[in-house]
Image (tube, coloured by chain):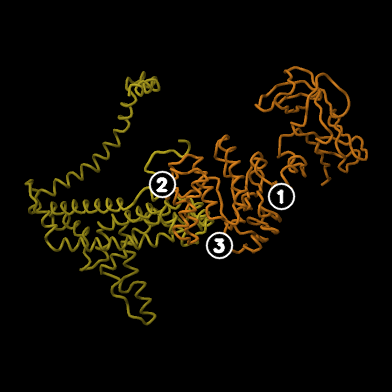
Chain colours: A yellow, B orange
Amino acid sequence: MTLENTDIQVVNAPAARRTGLSRRQIALLMQAPSVALIGMFFVLPILSIIVLAFWRTESYQIIPDFTLSNFSAVLFEGAYLTFFLRSFITAVAVSAVSVILAWPIAYFIVRVSGRWALLLGMLFALPFFTGEVIRLIALQGLLGPVGLINSMMMWMGLQPIRALIFTPIASAIGIFYLYLPTAVTALCLSLVNFDFRLADAARTFGAGPVRTFLEVTWPLNLVGTLVGFILCFVPALSSALAPRFLGGPNGTLFGMSLAQQFGDTGTWSLGAAMGVFLFAATLLMVFMLSRAVNPQRSGFSGGTAEREGR
Amino acid sequence: MYIEIDGISKTYGRRVKALDDINMAIDKHEFISLLGPSGSGKTTLLRIIAGLETPSAGRVLIDGKDVTGQPPHQRGVAMVFQEFLLFPHRTVVENLSFPLRMLHLERGEIARRVGWALEILSLTGLENRYPRELSGGQQQRVALGRGLVASPKLLLLDEPLANLDRELRQEMEIEIRRYQKELGIPFIYVTHNQEEALSMSDRIAVMSMGDVEDFAERTIVYNHPKTPFIARFVGRSNAFHGRVRSVSSTAMVVDCNGIAVQASNVGARPGDEVDLYIKNEKISLLRGTAAGENAPACTVRDVILRGNFTEYLLAAANGQMLVAGLPAGAETFLPGEDVTAVWDEAAVDAFVRRLQ
């Protein structure tokens, strides 16, 4: 420690002379704005939601009495658990389908498209340039009773598909549409950082295309795949807009119900408790998924041993 | 022959010709080096033999069988890569057993062969380490073991020692050549390092700009370069350029800007432009001055000690710099001394410049 401090003093002699501060103090000072920002816009809101979840709201008034009634409502009033289960199943299904479809898309962008890769990647990011509501209303036009798909069906003399709009399936399609680009982006980043020469090596050592994928490409991109899954799963689980525009009467999802507590019904503390529950469920899911990965078996060292020398 | 490379060409797009009609035949017991600067096409040729790239024209035959259309995993070849390319998510044992599992060998056989590889490559004790827990030399041994363990028909090595330090490299050169002799399969070794090529190979193919300049025994490549490129690229040489002054039936005398060089007659006529190359170690030094051909008067400018030999930087009367390499234990000279650089007529590699 002493040695370290001496070093620091020497290195920073000019800065110290000018400001009278040590390197450590300067570093702390430079981090202050970002710490303040995160504190104000991330930590404080979450803390206030947690506190609010243990209070009551009565006729649009917040009453600061400690109570567990909000949580017991979330856990034991059937409707909220139903909404949550519906959200959970939707989120898992949508994330799984997104990741499965994202694999070939990302693989194509990274491996095949060559100099078009950047353009294709940008095209996939294009939906991010506009609002979620606009995109969902566009989907209404596509899926609706007289929308593009059903009009085509009827024009071909087929029965329209009723399940396409104002059903849980419709909100699942909406959520999928919103978050597929996220999965594709996550997988593209993973594949860009994957050394495809390792696949070449596997092929020269007798592995066919399928074995090469299963033994090398898949395990070494497992973390990227899980990141893609989680980045879909987290917003999908709390999705509020897609069920509102596409879900119909039986399509209420947890996030949509949560939003209603803060809007129409004015039961803010119940909404806060739902938010805390959602946060906890998400953290648990991410924790379980990260536990499922063995870093060494996914090509991450976990150690600090250097490549050269030892 | 065991391996035949028959008219292989590779073009990228319309213009870039990476390989131009390469023909080689390799015997079963041979250690072959593809030697050339970067961009000469040597790695492309190796990847075509492995099946990782498709040739634009030509065929590759291994053990009498045309494998040109076969994917890499059906060819029964193995490869050692410059960056090792060990599977980072697999331990040493798992990396070594990979090619064996792909052959669907039974467990006992896999264990036996992996044990053999661990033994001959002195990797015992590192079985359960992951690649990044190994030193560069250890990673190299695992890569080599992974190449050898399945007894391939042919082992391809793509600059496998380029990432190792000099001492380790020289140690591995001896090892690699030993494995090749013991296993009795051909090794095709790509390198830009002439020392590696010369120390290990039976025959060397010198490559330049997509062509094989010469494919011959290493002593021939070194002592009798077939082209000016080989003369420049292999060994350390002094280059002269001049016009032929006179020819006899066996010899010619070339005037190189005041230095008269006598060389074997390579079919030149008086007045022809020729390029001459003399390897550093084929020049020796005499005290004082002398007259005649192959004996320019020089001044010693600097002395560079290389350990087992000494290099003398010489300035000739016409201003040209020469380098003479004398073995350790030879007579020594001091900077500023006047000397005569002398060499044999046979030491001169001469090439007549053909008119374009």
Q: Residue at point 78% right, 34% down? A: B278
- The alpha-carbon separation of the residues under discs 3 and 1 comes to 28 Å
Q: Which mark is residue B74?
A: 3
| Subunit that carries the residue with mark 1 | B
Residue mark closest to the camera, 3 vs 1: 3
Quadrant hosting residue A13: top left
Task: Describe residue A268's horizontal placement relative to residue A182 as left or right.
Answer: left
Residue mark closest to the camera, 2 vs 3: 2
Of label 3 and label 1, which has the lower sequence position?
3
Q: Residue at point 40% right, 59% down? A: A102
Vertical relation: A17 (above or below) B233: above
Q: Residue at point 18% right, 51% down? A: A276
Could you tell me how many numbered marks the image carries?
A: 3
Vertical relation: A32 (above or below) A226: above
Task: Describe residue A284's horizontal placement relative to residue B58 as left or right.
Answer: left
Of label 2 and label 3, which has the lower sequence position?
3
Instruction: Classify 10 Å Cα crowding around label 1: few (below 14), some (14-19), many (20 and above).
Output: many
Instruction: Classify 10 Å Cα crowding around label 3: few (below 14), some (14-19), many (20 and above).
Output: some
Task: Name the kind of residue labelled 3 in the image.
Answer: Gln
| Subunit that carries the residue with mark 2 | B
Residue matched to label 1: B212
Q: As rendered, which of A113 and B110 lies closer to the eye?
A: B110
Residue matched to label 2: B128
Task: Describe residue A188's horizontal placement relative to residue B184 as left or right.
Answer: left
Residue B109: percent from left, percent from top: 47, 57
Residue A289: percent from left, percent from top: 30, 53
